[in-house]
Amino acid sequence: NLVLKRGNDRWQARKDCRQAKMWIGDITSEKRRFVRQAIGLSRFKLGLLIQYFSGHAHLQYHNHKIDPTCSPVCRLCGNELETSFHVMFQCVATGVVVSGGLRDSKTVWSQSAEQVATTIGNLIKLLDLE
């Protein structure tokens, strides 16, 4: 599809949106299905998805950008920057919470938007962000 290819080319050419690109990669029909599902979620759950996919969640890396005195390092493992991508896919301390096939960004899109939002909610509880 030419329209999808042009959209992907523009998306990949952008110099910003680093964290969103880590999550999303190329736009596919599977991802479009996910977005259609997400639009039907509650405002709270849709907000969680948007915060995590955009990198604007209340995690240490984002907090450090707002307040440089705040450490950007992961509170759970202490090894990497605490980004939404790290907490969801790379942190050794979140392996028990992140289950159901969500151990890399490519598998997110095969899950329902509801499942992913629920997993993010569980991560927030683990990080004690409620």
Image (cartoon, rainbow, N blue to C red):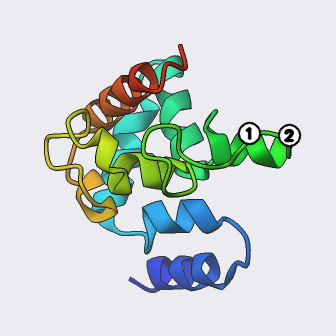
In the picture shown, does residue 80 fall above or below 25?
Answer: above
Q: Nearer the viewer, residue 123 or 41?
A: 123
* Quadrant of residue 13 within the rendered picture: bottom right
Q: Residue at x 56, y 76 (%)?
A: 7
Residue furthest toward the left? Answer: 100
Q: CA distance from mark 1 to mark 2?
A: 6 Å
Q: Can residue 18 be seen?
A: yes
Q: Nearer the viewer, residue 79 or 90?
A: 79
Q: Can you identify the residue that label 2 sits on?
A: 67
Q: Can you identify the residue that label 1 sits on?
A: 63
User: Do callouts 1 and 2 mark residues in contact (Cβ within 8 Å)?
Assistant: yes
Amino acid at dot 2: Asp
Amino acid at dot 1: Asn
Name the secondary structure under disc 1: helix
Q: Nearer the viewer, residue 49 or 79?
A: 79
Q: Residue at x 31, y 37 (%)?
A: 116
In the picture shown, does residue 39 fall above or below 78?
Answer: above
In the rendering, at what x and y percent does residue 97 appear? Answer: 25, 33
Q: Along the horizontal axis of the image, is 106 left or right of 15? A: left
In the rendering, at what x and y percent does residue 59 appear? Answer: 61, 38
Q: Nearer the viewer, residue 117 or 2?
A: 117
Name the secondary structure under disc 2: loop
In the rendering, at what x and y percent does residue 30 appear? Answer: 28, 60
